[in-house]
Amino acid sequence: MTVRNWAVKFADHLSDDANPPKGDTRAFTLEDAQVLSLVAQFIKHKSPEEIHARLRNGEVGTFPLITSAGLDTRDSPGSIQLLEQKVEELQMALNLVIKERDDLRTQLDPTQESVIKLNTQVAVLTEMLAAERQRAEDAYARGIREGMVLITHPPTPNSRPSTEDPKPTADAAAPAPAEGQGG
């Protein structure tokens, strides 16, 4: 049986975090660890009902004594040497990971600068595109207006379209008769 199975089977004696909702991280309190320690101690030769009864009576498991050096006082000197070697190996591995992280940060800095420059260029190009769109829309609208003028005032076969005011016709150019003359 695993700790997860024990946490489910003995959930009545554990905190809510020992059996979180699916997807959440399982976390144990010190009291949970004491309950699971008792379970581990008796699971092989006691029934789950007997273990539940012990827990209901307030019985909990214990942990080995830990010294200020962080080692079990029951460990032999050989075990302490093995632990010290393991700590040294882990420290070397940690140093390698730290160096690797620092190298990656060094590589990341120029990349971040490039991303900033590219984002700036994108912003400038976006503004230019918006200005070009506006010019195109204005030109389109101007073309539509000019087309409407041509439709409502089509040019004669011998004339060219002009933007100037039309010249007065012969009738309009003749002076009006003076008062009292002809009429």
Image (cartoon, rainbow, N blue to C red):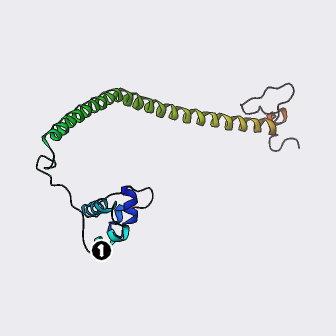
User: Where residue 60 appears, x then y in whole percent?
Assistant: 24, 66
Q: Give, as a three-letter code, the residue at label 1.
A: Arg
Q: Which residue is found at the position 25% from the left and 64% from the top?
A: 31
* 8 relative position to 141: left or right: left
In the rendered image, which quarter is residue 159 located in?
top right
Residue 174 vertical placement versus 60 (above, below): above
User: Where residue 113 appears, x then y in whole percent?
Assistant: 37, 29
Residue at the right extreme, as displayed: 183
Nearest the eye: 41 or 129: 41
Quarter of the image where the N terminus is located:
bottom left
Nearest the eye: 174 or 47: 47
In the rendered image, which quarter is residue 99 located in?
top left
* 16 relative position to 141: left or right: left
User: Where residue 27 appears, x then y in whole percent?
Assistant: 33, 57
Residue 94 vertical placement versus 20 (above, below): above
Q: Residues within 10 Å of mark 1 (few under 14, many from 20)?
A: few
Nearest the eye: 48 or 157: 48
Residue at the bottom extreme, as displayed: 57
Residue at the left extreme, as displayed: 68
Circle 1 SS class: helix
**Picture mark count:** 1
Q: Which residue is found at the position 15% from the left and 55% from the top?
A: 65
The residue that disc 1 covers is: 56
In the rendered image, which quarter is residue 83 located in?
top left
Residue at the front extreme, as displayed: 45
Quarter of the image where the C terminus is located:
top right
